[in-house]
Amino acid sequence: MISADMKSEEGDLDEDAINNFTCELGVLSQCDGSATLCNGLTAVLAATFGPVEVRQQRELVDRSSIEVTFRGPHGVEGVEDRRVEQLVRSTLEQCVFAALHPRTAVSVVLNVLETDDLLLLSTCVNAAVLALLDSSLSMKYLPAAVTCVPVGDRVLVNPLPSERQGSSGGSVTAVYDTGSERLVACRTAGQLSAEQLTSCLREARRAAAMVRQLYRRAVAAKFSKEPRDPWAGPSRAEDMPPSWRRLGGQQAGEQSTS
Amino acid sequence: MSQGSSAGSPGEAICVVPGDCLCAADDKHVAGKGTIERSGYIYSCLVGRVYTQQQEDKTELVEVRTGQEQNIVPTAGSVVTAKVTYVNPRFLRCEILCIGETVLKHKFRGMLKKEDVRATERDKVKMYECFRPGDVILAKVVSLGDALSYVLSTAENELGVALAHSEAGALMVPLSWAEMRCPLTQARELRKVAKIPPEDVAFRLARSADRRPRRRLSPGATGPLLSIQHTADQPEVQAVA
Amino acid sequence: MAADMRAIQPESLYKLHLECEERPDGRKLDAARTTVVTRGGITTADGSAFCRSGHTSVLCGIKAEVCTPATDAPPDRGWVVPNLELPALCHHRFRPGPPSEAAQTASAQLLQLLDASGALDRTQLCIEAGQAVWVLYCDLICLSHDGNVLDVALLALSAALTDLRLPSAEWDATEERLRVKPAQRTPLKLGPLPLAATLAVFDKETLVLDPAGDEEMLCEASVTVAWAGDSMVLLDKTGGCELSLEAMDRCIALSKKRSLELKKLLDCCTQSGEVEKGE
Amino acid sequence: MCAYMWAPPFSAVSTMELLSDQGLRVDGRRAHELRNVECRLGVFGRADGSAYLEQGNTRVLATVYGPHEARAAQRRHDVASINCQYRQAVFSGWERGRRAGGGGDRRAQELGALLQNTLESVVLVELYPRSQIDVYVQVLQADGGTYATCVNAATLALIDAGVALRDYVCACSASVLRDQPLVDLNSLETSGAPELTAALLPRSGRLPLLEMSQRFHVDKLGELLDVAETACRDVHTILNRAVRRHVSARSSEK
């Protein structure tokens, strides 16, 4: 049933942008929502708590305050970690319906399991969104983050380190609202020409729609594991369409170690 | 030491600096603002110009005026404009933004207790039916209060909520002393509404937010300036009980 | 009892201003504040610059020190260490204490911008590979904070780098010690320096260049774009409302124009001195 | 990483005579002469009061915020509390100083507390109960007499802020070299000689601060104090002239 809906709505998109993605929702039991997301060599575990009681200092009278804690792979906290936190927090502040829970806090914890640095930022944003989806917090829209690297005239989307030969070191990480296709956040690194930036931003917008599909499948896969849920789709892995299968738990582990 | 340039020319006030001796503190002279009386003399404690003022008891009040914004702090009895930040069933907290007509550079914290909301039926007051966070209120300072904040009161017709936004986010129009209406949804919300005197056009203009002027603003234009500009086409005033 | 609209409803007042396309300080939407660059004011530093844009002022002083490169670092490259301080002195919102998160991230961003621009070839800072290299401690102090500190800080850093004169130093291999002649000084060879422009976004579409402190507090989003010559070295849009790609294109064009103005300002005063750019 | 230090530019002079036979000092001043003073009030529009002061090569910026609502820890119910912070820029000296912040710099903390005590003697704190006045001084370039310059700059900033003061407070440093008292030392002279810093309320002649480093003979103290007091009065004359000029400029603008 869900698969038919998806086909009609999303059509057949080229899926190069999310080829290297694996994800799983609800991996942790003690938090309100959790997700792991692997993108190539980068793996992030996200957990959300909330809405919970808020510390007096951070209390906001008209909405809930969103706190993001980022734990890097090395355990040493640095300034770069704060910048990742800032970007994820500001993205979530826009998309979460914070006004529904005034005077509360929603806290998101991001744990980096593995990283190749380039894709860290976009993976963190996407993992945080998946964890929020898992926690069933109301959201205004689904943001999707994509990292693009210009190489010559081409633009690579979410490239693996092996694919980045010949790049000048510039990269663009963009977060889009997948509904209105407007830019939520953007951060670049290295040198880019204005044309490269423009083509990266446009390419990222196209790829963000694919990340949205990934979100849909992840949620569908979650419901498929919960047979009591009347919304559940196929319950056994064999019944799922082939493209869904790699979203299963064991495969995710295998991919991240390879 | 050089005396102020204006000292020589008669008619113009003398320029003084802190520590300057102004005159003897005798039966005829009383130390006013910006001065200090010490060992029989009146000294200046600000940089500014000296002004004297004849008082009713035939003494002269000696003042030093700086000609710029005075550093004022709230005192008991002054009417303040404040923004509500926190409401609970017993009291509310707010930030004091203006004292009288002076805009403060630094905000002060204020507190309004449930029993000071109105003068009658004080025990039936429900805080949530009078104020919401984000409301702009007019209140009078009752006392300096405890260590944390100034204690305010709205127990007068002219005091209470001056500006409030509805749940839909629009500026609401007052209907009576206890109700306001949202112009977007027509929903009514309860507030302890202040009766704004007709000459206070700044609030009236702000309340009728739909009628925005489409004319050039002078740089640094502020509220009172706006109100003077628009007294001619003053918007119709909603009846306030 | 007439209360000031500026205090009570800054948002509505600002909207009125935007409708008239004129900002509270009298600027047009795409106009920057008057910017002043003064070089070489601090005689105890090896290079210094003072930059002011409206009420925002940043002072940058560079001190060069010699150190041995660490074993895991490239032996023939020196270091640049920018550090931006936002002391309590510059704004009443700040309190005395350890450096704030904003100051730390801004310092990191300055280093990132300088590295990305490639303006400074760090092999110039090498005295003897593996033995002695220069470390440039670039300390920036914000003296007055009225919005848009990063742009002004970056301008101050770039100007101070052009003002920097390194003492000539030689490594004496036989005695294994360094000989520094502080009297003989040479400037660095610099590529295109990074220059940033920040825009604030109101009403989802309206772009406002070089926001002042109040505008920074009221705006829905802000976009910082930095250029080094013709290439973009940073586009940072963290937080705030969503933007259409057309609005982003306008951001890029406006920031490019502003960075060219700033570059002209820097070039004008390559000789030590003060240059003012009137708006 | 080991740091190599190279000689600061003036090391060659350190053996030179600080006071020539003609009675001239290294920078050509006479013994009782102050350095050139430049000052401006109201340099930063966003602060309640600010002042920039140059005494020779020592450059100091002071800003004042307040009186505003006091933070809980500093609140006093009957008077205003004065909160001072002293900061020295890391590039202000010939050798790069330690980074400020984190409360690590003991000397800066001490000078902040000292400044607070000095200013409490002139500010009419009883006029602003339960409030707080922040005075921040930032040394941009240090060439001797930094503390004295900070006191003078803070006075100017308080005046600019319109905070009620009993009087000016003016400070100056003094020293003794080969039996000859010197005033307003620069960093070269400080390195070799004892230093006395005095602050004075010129109208009442009171000394709210007296700080000494190194030793000198007690018989010299009286003479040194006289010299320091005269120097403080000279500073007062200069500051007073600047303030009056500022006020007349401000009123002519209107």
Image (cartoon, coloured by chain):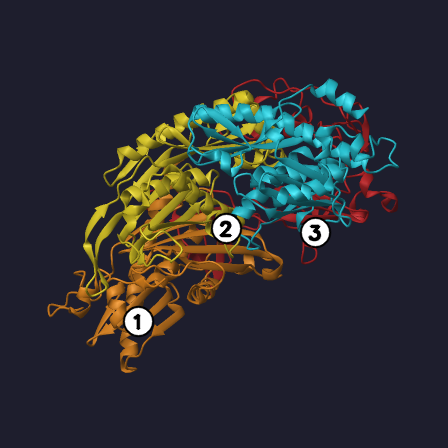
Q: In the image, is residue B45 above or below residue A131?
A: below
Q: Can you tell which chain is drawn yellow? A: C
The CA span between labels 3 and 2 is 29 Å
Residue at mark 1: D195
Kindly identify the residue that appears in the image at 63 percent across and 31 percent down. Answer: A144
Residue C128 at x, y percent in the picture: 26, 55
Residue at mark 2: D65
Three-letter amino acid code of the residue under disc 2: Tyr
Tell me the crowding category of disc 1: few under 14, some 14 to 19, or many 20 or more residues within 10 angstroms, Cα based: many
Q: Can you tell which chain is drawn cyan? A: A
Badge 1 and badge 2 both on one subunit: yes
Is the Cβ of the residue at disc 1 closer than 8 Å to that at disc 2? no
Q: Can you tell which chain is drawn red? A: B
Question: Label 1 marks which chain's residue?
Answer: D
In the depicted view, which residue is nearer to us: A220 or B235? A220
Q: In the image, is residue C99 above or below residue C255?
A: below
Does residue C58 show up? yes
Residue A164 at x, y percent in the picture: 48, 34
Q: Can you tell which chain is drawn orange? A: D
Three-letter amino acid code of the residue under disc 3: Arg
Badge 3 and badge 1 both on one subunit: no
Three-letter amino acid code of the residue under disc 1: Glu
Q: Which mark is residue A55?
A: 3
